[in-house]
Amino acid sequence: MNILEFIPHSPLSMGLVDLDYTFVVELGVFLLLMIALNKLLFEPLQRNLDHRRASISGARAEAESMSLEAQQLVEQRRESVDQARDRAYSAINEMKNEGQAREQEILKAAHQRVDEQVKKGRAELQEALTKSRRETENESDVLATLIVEKLLDRT
């Protein structure tokens, strides 16, 4: 007697399924097939999938590490370029300031030379003027004497 026979509308009570030794054989074949498929197909497939997951996660971790390293290198490069730019601007400004200082020195020296030449020229002019006045005074005395003598001779 089977318990399924007493359940209304069960396959056994309706006579559709017979439970006999073939059911046990089929169940055994199913279990053997399940064990064989598990050993031959599912476990290797699962190992393969696990291996793929591990390699993918390793590759992702390596890619993230490389990406982080690349970002750090880019940042270092940017900092070094900024430092080089700052040094270049500093050098340019220093050269510019040195050039302006040199320009001021040259202009100051030129102004001093010009001032000295102007003073020298004024002194020479003053000396020439003084000499000319003395000569003119001497000549005017001589000329006055000559004029007086001529006037006196005519009279």
Image (cartoon, rainbow, N blue to C red):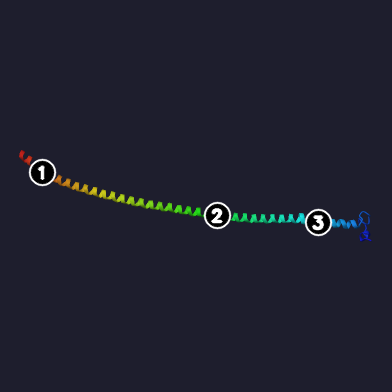
Q: Which amino acid does label 3 sit on?
A: Met
Gap in angstroms between the C-alphas marked 2 and 1? 101 Å
Q: Which mark is residue 104?
A: none
Number of the front mark, 3 or 2: 3
Rendered residue at 21%/48% (across/down): 124
Q: In this view, does 110 lie to the left or right of 134?
A: right
Q: Name the residue under label 1.
A: 142
Which one is earlier in the sequence, the residue at label 2 or at label 1? Answer: 2
Mark 1 near mark 3, Cβ–Cβ under 8 Å? no
Rendered residue at 49%/55% (across/down): 83
Gap in angstroms between the C-alphas marked 3 and 2? 55 Å
Gap in angstroms between the C-alphas marked 1 and 3? 155 Å
Which one is earlier in the sequence, the residue at label 3 or at label 2? Answer: 3
Which one is earlier in the sequence, the residue at label 1 or at label 3? Answer: 3
Whether residue 153 appears in this view of the structure is yes
Q: Mark 2 points at which residue?
A: 73
Instruction: Identify the element where label 3 is drawn.
Output: helix
Rendered residue at 10%/43% (across/down): 142
Q: Name the residue under label 3.
A: 34
Instruction: Identify the element where label 1 is drawn.
Output: helix
Instruction: Identify the element where label 2 is drawn.
Output: helix
Q: Is residue 56 left or right of residue 86?
A: right
Q: Which amino acid does label 1 sit on?
A: Val
Are there few (<14), some (14-19), or many (20+) residues within 10 Å of tag 3? some
Query: Residue 132: x, y in percent?
Result: 17, 45
